[in-house]
Amino acid sequence: MSDTNATYAQVTASMEVLRPSNYFRVPMDDWVDSGVDWLVDNFRPAFQAVKWPVEKVLNGLDGLLQATPFIVFTVLVALLAWRLAGRGVAIFTIISFLVLDAVGVWSETMTTLAMILTAVVFCAVIGIPLGISAAASDRFASGIRPVLDIMQTIPPFVYLVPIVMLFGVGLVPGVIATIIFALPPIVRLTNLGIRQVQGELVEAGYAFGSTPRQVLWEIQIPLALRTIMAGLNQTLMLALSMAVIAALIGAGGLGLTVYTGLGRLDVGQAFLGGLGIVLLAIVLDRITQALGTQGEEKQPGWTFKGILRMLTGQGRESSSEEREGKAASSAAE
């Protein structure tokens, strides 16, 4: 037994010789520090310019939501939930908002909602064109995939420090960190949805003389819209999951309530912040999921006009008229 242990120790010692750290050390951390310092010294005005549109959209949404009376906002969201997801979700939305107001976190909820909506808007503006480009070019898709892998797997705490150095602290840097964290799903699922469109339909479009732009907007995007909406739903959920982490760099809202409760060991305050995030996540998830389901049922009508018609109720009327027409045709046959 002792001979076996001695042999194992000798083998282990010989293997240790092969470790690169015995001969040199790569100063990766120093390189990263130097790179971030170089970016701050030379490109800080450019990063502040990137911050400007995010700040304008965030301030506008936050001001609008804070100024909207509680009862008006609750009724509007409940009507939207009833129209898209049904009576049960509408009732749950009303109860959730009443609870959030009763426990005293309504203002924080509106700030969090403004942050999430701002992040989702910029994720859609950036992510959908990237997904369309990835679907059109295998080389571009191969190039962007490692970047998306890094964005999805790297812990958010790692890039909070450079974000603070480049953008400062506050709500806007928190939204920028949220955009980085929540962007990959909408890029991936836009790419996937367009690639899943049947090739015969695309070929038929070209055979009838359509241009690539017409094929994209009239065939590929309407048929891929259900998958794109699933990506938007995932982006929304990831953005909500960043609410607490973003509070570490000065973002407010429900995340700050949770963070303050943790710092003071105030379990009740932390619970209120967590309850607000959970209820808001459930309401937004049910509404966006229903939006994707509506798209599955009415794919040919899923344009901007189609969405407006669906929200105003005309879509259902036209759908019922179509069903009645089909039924009448079947009866005539």
Image (tube, rainbow, N blue to C red):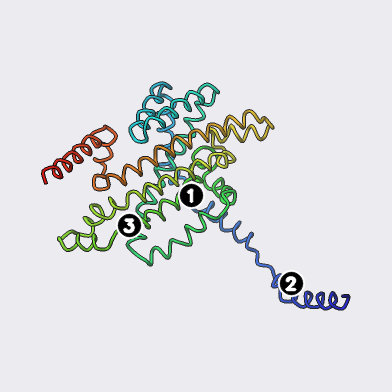
Q: Are marks 2 and 1 in contact (CB under 8 Å)?
A: no
Badge 3 crowding class, 10 Å Cα cut-off, few under 14, some 14 to 19, many 20 or more, is many
Q: Which residue is mark 3?
A: 194
x%, y% of residue 47?
47, 48
Which percent across, then down, holds residue 297? 29, 45
Looking at the rendered structure, the kind of residue marked 1 is Ile
Q: Secondary structure at mark 2?
A: helix
Closer to viewer: mark 1 or mark 3: 3
Q: Amino acid at mark 2?
A: Asn
Residue 151 is left or right of residue 291, and the answer is right
**What's under tag 3, amino acid-wise?**
Ile
Q: Which residue is mark 1?
A: 180
Mark 3 to mark 2: distance in Å?
A: 50 Å
Q: Say which mark, if any, is on residue 18.
A: none
Image position of 46 with respect to 201: above or below: above
Residue 194 lies in quadrant: bottom left
Residue at position x 41%, y 25% in the image: 74
**Residue at 31% in and 45% down:** 295
Q: Earlier in the sequence, mark 2 or mark 1?
A: 2
Q: Position of residue 247 (x, y in %)?
A: 57, 38
